[in-house]
Amino acid sequence: MKKVDCEEVKKGVHEYLHSELHEEELEQVTAHLANCDSCESHYDIEVIFNQVIQRACDEVPAEQLAERVMDRLREIQQHD
């Protein structure tokens, strides 16, 4: 199995989190994360970042915000 370096792992951590890598790549990154504190810390930050985004996307926007967005969309559509 080919070893991956820190740069490759940090570039591919998003794909890793979303299981978008091939099985062999997943295994390589998993093995690297298990043995590299720096990359594991980077991975942990990405996990937290993704959780924050997920929570933000799950929340219902304030009614005023939703109205402003819809008004802006209508305005854009009228100009097209």
Image (spheres, rainbow, N blue to C red):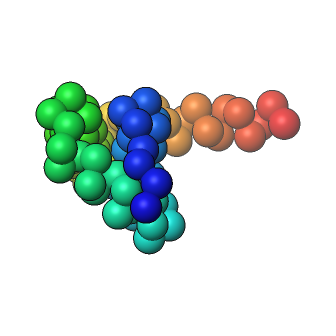
View extreme (front): residue: 1
View extreme (right): residue: 80
Residue plotted at (43% across, 61% down): 1
Q: Is residue 9 left or right of residue 36?
A: right
Q: In this view, does 9 lie to the left or right of 49?
A: right
Task: Residue 9 in the image: state x and y as whole percent.
Answer: 39, 40
Image: 69 above or below 3: above
Residue plotted at (43% across, 30% down): 7
User: Looking at this view, is 38 or 72 the one in front?
Assistant: 38
Image: 62 above or below 16: above
Rendering quarter of residue 27: bottom left
Image: 20 above or below 60: below
Q: Is residue 58 left or right of residue 13?
A: left
Q: How many marks?
A: 0
Q: Can residue 48 be seen in this view?
A: no
Quadrant in which the C terminus appears: top right
Task: Residue 29 in the image: state x and y as whole percent.
Answer: 34, 52
Task: Residue 61 in the image: state x and y as whole percent.
Answer: 29, 43
Rendering quarter of residue 66: top left
Residue plotted at (36% across, 33% down): 6
User: Looking at this view, is 38 or 46 the one in front?
Assistant: 38
